[in-house]
Image: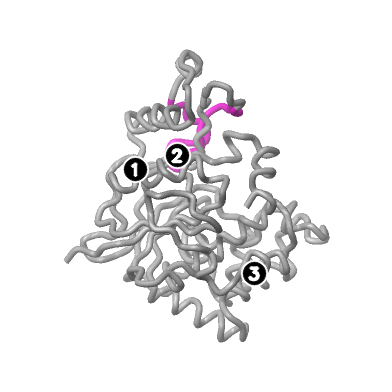
Amino acid sequence: MITMIDLVYPCHSKDISTIDICIKYARLNIQNLNNIYVVSKTKLTDNAIWISEDAFPFTFQDMIDVIGDHWRTGWYYAGWIHLQSSICIPNILDNVLISDADTVFIRPVSFIDDEGKALFNLSPSDGTPLYFEHMNKLIPGLTPQIKPPWSGVAHHILMNKTILKHMMNVAEEKHGIPFWKAWINVTLESYKSSSCEHNPNKHRDGPGRATSYELYFNYAMKYFPDSVKVRKLDSIMSYKGFLNVKNDNYKEAEGSRTNLRGNKYTVIPKEEELKVTFETFIECLEFHIQKCIEAGFDNVTFQNHQRDGLGIHKEKASVEKR
């Protein structure tokens, strides 16, 4: 029996340059794919089903009220969308692939095996001690289920509605408030592993204190081991090739970060990159995607902060630009 899945992209306006190409390749390569949803404040594409953020039980202002108004507020807010989409989107399937809106699946890929088990990807070094502290504070007894340096933070994960509801019920019984409130309130507690614990702007300036991906990955692996398993995709976690687009000042970097081939993998030699200037960003992406396909990768993430530089990324991610 074939198990169909839905796909959800939580989107910010800064993702408008990549979302359509993500959708295009998802339709080509994700097996047994049903609907594609884009969750955003305003409609950003005509190529998927738009879900307004108004469908959720919280607002962006609710997040601001807890952690402040800064460039990382949206990053935490996306975590709420990740964890609540399977609950809040009408008629969505039981199995939902949550993906960042800059991750492109460039070769055929399955997310459920022949036995009906969800398939999880891994990333090296993306997990932080703060993430592990967070999930243990939220759900006591929840600890990392894989050995370092591996992490469940891989820019996407397949979530099952039954597992999600089970996790939410456990957290709500512990904290006595709705799951989404508990998830962010826990980040206000003291963290032993934080280097900026006394910084009043720790949510803005420090490393992330919570992630939906690590939380769900470890919960499913611990409490539903017969329903999930790890299978590593050959992934570029952060593409660092030079995107040579005419009239754009994209940042040059050396070597892409991958999960299986190291942190300095060169997809296209520098001299080849510099030979071609592209008229549009999409034309450039298509060129680099084809090179990643030829190199045998399954998916590639074109992180906004990598191609723009952190300063411009912070500006794009600000509340005012939502």
Q: Residue at horizontal 47%, vertical 27%?
A: 280
Q: Which residue is mark 2?
A: 236
Whether residue 322 is situated above or below residue 221 in the rendered picture: above
Q: Furthest-left residue in view? A: 1
On the image, the x and y values in percent for residue 92 come to: 36, 68
Task: From the image, state whether disc 1 or disc 3 is nearer to you.
Answer: 1
Q: Is residue 255 magenta?
A: yes
Disc number placed over residue 230 in the picture, else none: none
Labelled pair 1, 2 in contact (Cβ < 8 Å): no
Q: Which residues are magenta?
A: 250-267
Whether residue 129 is situated above or below residue 236 in the rendered picture: below
Q: Real-space Cα distance between discs 1 and 3?
A: 33 Å
Magenta stretch: helix, strand or loop mostly: loop
Whether residue 58 is situated above or below residue 288 in the rendered picture: below
Identified by mark 1, the residue type is Tyr
Q: Is residue 57 magenta?
A: no
Is the residue marked by circle 3 packed among few (<14), some (14-19), or many (20+) residues within 10 Å? many
What colour scheme governs how the chains and residues are painted in the rendered image of this protein?
one colour
Identified by mark 2, the residue type is Ile
Q: Which residue is more in the foreground, 37 or 224? A: 37
Q: Residue at horizontal 49%, vertical 54%?
A: 43
Q: Is residue 317 left or right of residue 230?
A: right
Q: Earlier in the sequence, mark 1 or mark 3?
A: 1
Q: Secondary structure at mark 3?
A: helix
Q: Real-space Cα distance between discs 1 and 2?
A: 15 Å
**Which quarter of the rendered picture does the N terminus lie within?**
bottom left
Q: Which residue is mark 3?
A: 184
Disc number placed over residue 25 in the picture, else none: 1
Identified by mark 3, the residue type is Ile
Is the residue marked by circle 2 packed among few (<14), some (14-19), or many (20+) residues within 10 Å? many
